Image (cartoon, coloured by chain):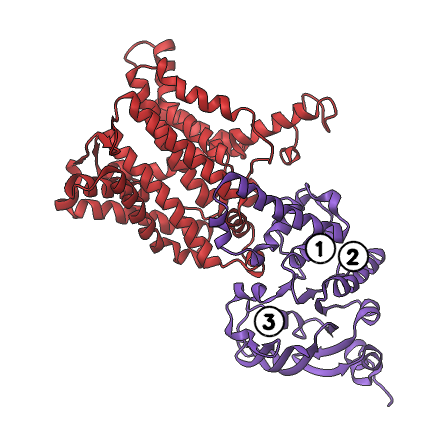
Amino acid sequence: MHILDVEELFISFRGLVALNGINFSVEEGEIFGLIGTNGSGKSTFFNCVNRLYKPQKGRIIYKGKINLLKQRSHRIPELGIARTFQNLELFYYTKALENIMVGLHPRLKVRRLFKHLSPRAFNAAWEWDRNEAFRILDFLGITRFHGRLVSSLPYGLQKLIELGRALAARPDLLLLDEPSAGMNEQESREIARLIKSIREDYGTTVLLVEHDMSLVQSICDSLCVLDSGNIIKIGKPDEVTKDPEVLKVFLGEETDA
Amino acid sequence: MSDRMIKEDDEQKWWIAPLILSVYFLPLILGEYYIYLMNLVGVAIIGSVALDILCGFCGQLSLGHAAFIGIGAYSYGILHMTMHIGCVLSLLLAGLVGALVSLLIGVPSLRLKGLYLAIMSMGFVFIVDETIRYFRGWTNGVEGFRVSRIIDLGFVEFNSGKVGFYYFIYTLVILIVMASRFLLDSKLGRAFTSIRDSDTAAEVSGINLLFYKVLAFAISSFIASIAGGLMAIIVGTITPEDFNIWLSINYLVMLVVGGMGAVYGAVIGAAAIALLPECITGVRDAFLPPGTNIAVLQYLIYGLIILVFIVFEPHGIYGRWLVIKNYFKKFPFNEKRIGRVVWILRWR
């Protein structure tokens, strides 16, 4: 079953076409890689899914029935779509644990507030939030940093905390914008392992934008190559990376074929 | 702005119970004038906690606080004195009027940020001021509106000059402070603080920016308007000049001096700033020849305090207290030794 169907998605910024009527589908449970050169429209696509941008044309159908472009942006996480950013968007002056607790937001109903008017019930609810956040930190293996201010943590850990915040919403579809950017080789292997175990443990479909080709090849089930807002190839990683047109875009190579 | 915010730690506070007890025993040793003064401090605390919810928790810098206090005061006056509605109901309705009016600046706050929001809300103070002057038939204009100094709770009556009212107002203070503390730790508080720190991150975490910003404005204005109503009861006569831009600035100064983003910071700041003129008068009586004009001195000291806190102690009195407390908690295993400044963020 398709979890995401993108149909004729078109967006331009004052005449500059960022996505030129693209079409593709993401299967449920797969790790889908979106690659392309800078400015090819990968992050723009994420922003369209999240409704931070408003596309002029097209549809994004989620789980076969919901048109995401008709939803308000804060409703997207409630539907089960969480994301991370290429340039981190964190709450820098709060603790790591509290950052993750904010991610729980879409799972908590407003009526919960009225249920917990007594201090004891309130504390119990707070404990629950805390334990849930600790579970995420455990999963990411960064429990010991829970009390630290995010601004005082190294970049790699900040990326993990952002990932944790996205995971706290228990998403069905996780959008990762360059999860290994700015990380060293060891950290990037660790990220690859994490992404795989997110799929296995949470059953989450992962859509990822990445420049690190070795990472993409090692974990992705399908790849989609974008160039200036157009899709030039969709398929298995092996065939995509051998495609002459893709090589031309990426390496600027003239192929003899 | 968010790097200037502090937050309470999660520890149990041993000093809360003795503090509450001492607040209740204080009238036994205070004279009538000081009780009047403490009542004003109580109103200041309620008002500054209200502003802290908006500025400290939610990060919406507002200079319109005086307008809501004014709206509360005049609404209470009109509802109770002109329409003869009961005291408690009038007070609650005054709060609701403030909350409703706050939608006027709450909704645009989705597009306006920081300084621009502050300036827009400042304009709102002038509008409210002019409106009060214009509707002379209802508000009695610049001549001042007389409000009864007696509050009738149905089963008991308090005169605002007497001890009973002191207990009433501080019970209210304690309830509001406790409620705000709970608010900060709930889903609502987390939504507010995340909007303060990053709009985009809050939005992708599923937080409805418009709803929560408007809610912050409504809660803050509701409490501020109740503070306004109480102020009217204490003062007895209210004029439009009582609610000008200086009152807004005064409340912001309370937050800066006490520590923005922490409820206890707002409480400490309100007490410190509200008692400041009294302290200056005390100093004059002790050290200067009798009859010295201290009006100039008062503004000088006031300005100096603002400067000193913004430059040297941006996290306010409560932030400094947290640093000191943390220092002794870790002693003697501190990262830095005595005589060196403990870096402010270390207290966490």
Q: What residue type is labelled 2?
A: Met
In front of the other: label 2 or label 3?
3
Q: Is residue B228 visible?
A: yes
In the rendered structure, the colour chosen for chain B is: red
The hue in which chain A appears in the rendered picture of the protein: purple
* Separation of residues labelled 2 and 3 (CA atoms): 26 Å
Q: Mark 3 points at which residue?
A: A49
Q: Which amino acid does label 1 sit on?
A: Lys
Q: Mark 2 points at which residue?
A: A183
Mark 1 vs mark 2: which is more N-terminal? Answer: 1
Q: What element carries label 2?
A: loop
Residue visible at 42% across and 55% down? B109
Q: Is residue B19 left or right of residue A162?
A: left
Q: Mark 1 points at which residue?
A: A159
In this picture, residue B103 sits left or right of residue B11: left
Q: Residue A13 appears in which quarter of the rendering? A: bottom right
Viewer-side residue, B218 vs B21: B21
Q: Are marks 1 and 2 in contact (CB under 8 Å)?
A: yes
Q: Mark 1 lies on which chain?
A: A
- The residue drawn where x is 53% and y is 49% is B187
Against B37, residue B66 (above or below) is: below
Kindly state the secondary structure of the residue where label 1 is placed.
helix
As rendered, which of A235 and B276 lies closer to the eye? A235
Q: Is A165 displayed left or right of A56 in the figure?
A: right
**Mark found first going from the N terminus, 3 or 1:** 3
